[in-house]
Amino acid sequence: MIEFSEVRKEFHGVSVLKGFNLTVHAGELVGLIGPNGAGKSTALRILTGQLLADAGDVRIHGHDLATQPLQARQCLGYVPQEPDIEPFLTGSEVLAFVADVRGVPQEPIVQTLLDEFSLAEAAHRLTREYSEGMLRRLAIASALIGNAPVLVFDESLNGLDPRGARFVRERMEIERDRGAAVLLTGHVLETLERICTRVVLLDQGAVALEVSRAELQDHLAQGRTLEDLYLDATA
């Protein structure tokens, strides 16, 4: 569903991605972690079409991002780290617009998502009046319209209260179970321990560690957390 193959990217002669390889299959929830400056944001910007790779291939649901950009992006639901939502639309208008763009009937999906994400009472307020947590919930709801086979969440648990964070985690697991390929970046390693089927550590532009759910459980049984693995791999 997601495939990075020997992807390279430089900025002003500095290599940010150095032959980055990553595959996310249908029904997987993969956590992408790493220190600040490791290349995570660059990888996601390439995946979402905001940057072009200098070398290598990127595919989304079998579509080459370089030669089939429209088809690739149609398969992708994306929640950026900082939701960029039109401030002079209401919450319901934002969801209705996304539904129209994706060719999905507005009803009942708009009202269903407003209810599920606890935004119904604010549905007719301008989004510029929304709190950070409300904007993030709205961005996540928008990404789910159309049942995209690939979902990317960039630091999407930030700004959420504990109840909202738990709801979003559970929703990610639901999307994984329906067969979507889910890629999540984050720094809350305890959360990734609980929900990810696999965790990939990116450091200095390349994969430094990859650990499956079963392997992680073995480490935890020996008293070694994901944080311990992270610190050892980035030492």
Image (tube, rainbow, N blue to C red):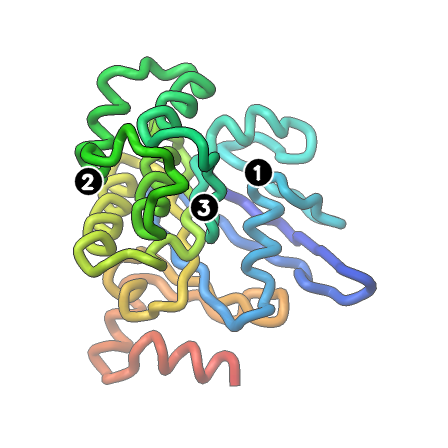
Q: Are marks 3 and 1 in contact (CB under 8 Å)?
A: no
Which of these two is toward me, 208 or 172? 172
At x 41% / y 41%, what residue is drawn?
Answer: 128
Reply above or below: 48 against 35.
above
Classify residue 130 by image quadrant.
Answer: top left
Q: Which residue is mark 3?
A: 83
Q: Distance between the Cα atoms at labels 3 and 2? A: 17 Å
Report x, y in % for residue 197. Answer: 31, 56
In the shown orientation, is residue 87 left or right of residue 227?
right
Q: Distance between the Cα atoms at labels 3 and 1? A: 24 Å
| Mark 3: amino acid | Pro
- Mark 3, secondary structure of its residue: loop
Task: Say which of marks 3 and 1 sits in front.
Answer: 3
Report x, y in % for residue 81. Answer: 46, 53
In the shown orientation, is residue 72 left or right of residue 139?
right
Q: Which residue is mark 1?
A: 59
Q: Which residue is mark 2?
A: 118
Classify residue 15 by image quadrant.
Answer: bottom right
| Mark 2: amino acid | Ser
Which of these two is toward me, 119 or 198? 119
Which of these two is toward me, 115 or 51? 115
Q: Does label 2 or label 1 sit earlier along the sequence? A: 1
